[in-house]
Amino acid sequence: MQDGRSLGDGKLLSYLRNKNKDLRYRAAIALANLQDTSTVGDLLPLVQDEDVQIRAAAVFALGQIGMIPGEKSLIGALTPEQDIQVLPRVFEALGKCGDSEALNSVIAFIPSAKNIAVKRDQALSIARFAIRKITSERGVWLCFDLLKDNHSETRSAALYALWRSAPRGVIDLEISNRAYLLVKLMSDKEADVRINLATLLGKTKSEEAPRLIKMFQQVESQSPDWRVEVQLARSVGLLAKIDPSLIELLLPYLDSRNDHVRITSLMTMASLDSGVVASSEYKEKLLTTLKSLAASPSKEAPLVQGEAFVTLGRLFPKELSVIKPSFDKRAAESLLRSKYIEALSYTPSQENIQYVVGCLDDDSIRVAMAAWDFLIRMIQPRVLEGQRIDKSYADSIPTIMVDRMESGLKRKDLAITTLVANLFADTSILEMCERAGYDNKIVGAFTLTYSNLSSADDAEAMMSIQQTFVRLRDTSVVPVLEKTLIDPNRTVALSAVTALTRITGRKYATRLPNPSVIQRTDNDWKMLESIKPSQRVSFRTTKGTFTVRLHKEDAPFTVLAFLKLVKQKFYNGLTFHRVVPDFVIQGGDPRGDGWGGAGFTIRSEWSLIDFEGGSVGMASSGKDTEGCQFFITHVPTPHLDGRYTLFATVTSGMEVVDRIQVGDRILSAELR
C-alpha cells in the first residue's frame, strides 16, 4: 500500500490500531511516505503510543505531512516526552512544518539530565526553520550559547543553524562580540565543527569576518583537512568580493595536493570580479598558476584542467585564446571540451561563437549539450551589439540557429531536445528568430518533436518544450498539449495545464483526471525475502574499493531494484558524473552525464535514517522519480532528511569515496 500510494480503502489506517506493534510502526512509516493530509487525525493517537519506535514513526509522519493540527500536537508532546529516540523526531518534524510559534517552543525547551544530548537536535530544528525562512533572535542567541557545549555534534549543529540563518544583523553582531569563541572553535578536533564554522564566516557580513578567516586559514594549515579547506576556499571567495585583499588566501589552495581543494578554489576564483583580480598585486602569480593548470592534463582529476579553462575564460580571456588546447582521444576529452566551451562563452567574439556553433552537432552528446547550454549567453542581441561581429554573420545567426535546431531535434536525445527547447524559450533569442520570419518553422519542428515524446522517458524534454510553446504564443499547439492532460505522469500533465492556461487564458485544471499510481508489476518477492538483513555491496573503482551496507528494512523496494541492477552488472563500467566537494559524489548513469536512467522509475522511500557522511541515497528529480542513479555524501547533510531515499551506508573505504572525481569509473559492483 505504501508503494502503491494507497490507503487500501481504510485498511492501512486500521493497522494504526492493530495490537501488533510492528504493524503499527510500519503503517506510520507508510503514511509518512503517502503524505496524505486526511490521515493526520488517525496518526495523532500514536504520538502517545506506549512503544518508543511507534511514537518516533508517528511524529516523523506528521512532519512529512506537515499539517497545522499535527503541529499543535507536536508542540504539546515536547514537554511530556522524555525519550531520547522520540524527542529528536519531534524537533525534526516541527522544523519541517512548524510556524514561528512552534519555533519559540523549540527554543524555550529545556532538556532534562536524561535527554541532554537532544540539544543537537534542538539546534538542527532551528536550522530546519531557517531553511524555510523562519528565524528569531532568541534562536540565534541559543545557538551561540550551544557553541560552548561539550558535545561536538551539538557545536556542529549550532554552527549549521547559524549559517542557515545568515546573513542576519544579530548574527553579525554576535560574531563581533564572541570572536574569542569562534577562534577557539578553529582548533576543534571535529572536522564537521570546523566545516560549519568556515561556512558561517562566509555567510556573515560582520566586519570581523575577514580577520577571522585569515586566522582560520593559518590554524587549519597546521593540520589540514580537505573538507575544511574546501569550505574555507568558498568563504574566502564570498568575502573577497568585499575585501579584495583576501584573494591572496586562495593562491596556496591552487597548489594543493587535494583535487577537491584545487577544483573548488578554481571555481571560486572564476566567480570573482575580473576587474578586481586584474588590478590586484597577485595577478601575475595567479595568471602563471592558471596557465600551468590549463596546459597540464590531470590524470587523477581532469576537471582541474577543465576548471582552469573556465577561470582563465572569466578572468583572463586573452590568455585562453593563446592556449588553444589540442584535445586528444582520452576518456576525459568530452569533459574537457565541454569546459572549454564554457570558458569561451564568457567572451562572445565572432570566432568563439563560430567555434561553439560548430559543436552543436558534435558526435559527443556531452560536447553538443555544452554548446547548446552555453550558446544562450553568447547570442543574446544585447551581447552581440557589444561585440565587434561582422554584420552579415550577425544577421545569419537566426538562420544558423533554426537549421541547427532541426538537426538537434532529429537526434532524438532527451538532453539535447531539452536544451534546444530551453534556448528557444529564451525570449530575446526567440524574438530574434521570429523577426527573421522563422516562427512557423519553429512551431512546426517543436510540435512534431513533442508529439513523438513519451513521459516515461522524456518528461523533462516535454516540460521544456511546453515552456517554448508558451513563449511562442501560437494556439496551433493547443491540440497536442491537450492530449498531455491525460498523461500518466502527473507532473507533466500539471505542467501542460499551466502552459495551456497561459497560451489560451482558459482554465484547464478541471479537465485533469484523478491522479493514479501505476502499480508495480515487477515485484520479486522471492528475491526480496532472500536479501540478507545486512547485505553488502562492494564497488571496485579506478580510485580503489569501498563497501556499502544496504538498509533493506527501511527502503525495501529501492534495495530490491538496486540489487537487480547489481546482479545484471548494470553499474560495471559506468562513471561518476557529478562531484560536489563537501556534499556528494553521484554515479550510476548509463549515459554518464546525469540525464540517463535504467528504463524504469521507483517510488521514494523515506525512513527514520538520517543523512550522515557516507550515506548512500537515490538521485531524484522529484517525488517518485528515482531509478538507477545514486549519490554518496561526504559530510552530514540534514537538509536531505526525509526528502531523498537513503538506502545504504558506506561501511569501509570512505577514504576512497573522498578521492573520487568526475570521470572515475566503477569497474565492478558485486554482492558481498
Image (tube, helix red, strand yellow):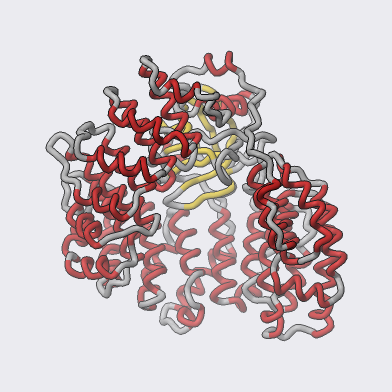
Q: What residue lies at 17% left-to-right and 40% top-to-bottom?
A: 116
Q: What residue lies at 43% left-to-right and 55% top-to-bottom?
A: 257
Where is residue 291 shown, x and y percent of the image? 55, 70
Question: Taking the image as drawn, is residue 472 in sight?
Answer: yes
Quarter of the figure with residue 113:
top left
Quarter of the figure with residue 61:
top left
Q: What residue lies at 81% left-to-right and 62% top-to-bottom?
A: 475
Number of numbered discs visible in the structure rendering: 0
Q: Is 531 above or below relative to 497?
A: above
Quarter of the rendering occupied by the N terminus: top right
Identify which residue, 388 or 217, lies in the foreground: 388
Left or right of residue 314, residue 437 in this image: right
Identify which residue, 432 or 590, lies in the foreground: 432
Question: Taking the image as drawn, is residue 371 in sight?
Answer: no
Q: Is 221 above or below relative to 544?
A: below
Q: What residue lies at 61% left-to-right and 21% top-to-bottom?
A: 523
Where is residue 271 shown, x and y percent of the image? 49, 70
Where is residue 84 shown, x and y percent of the image? 23, 33
Where is residue 19 shown, x and y percent of the image? 36, 15
Q: Is 183 above or below relative to 240?
A: above
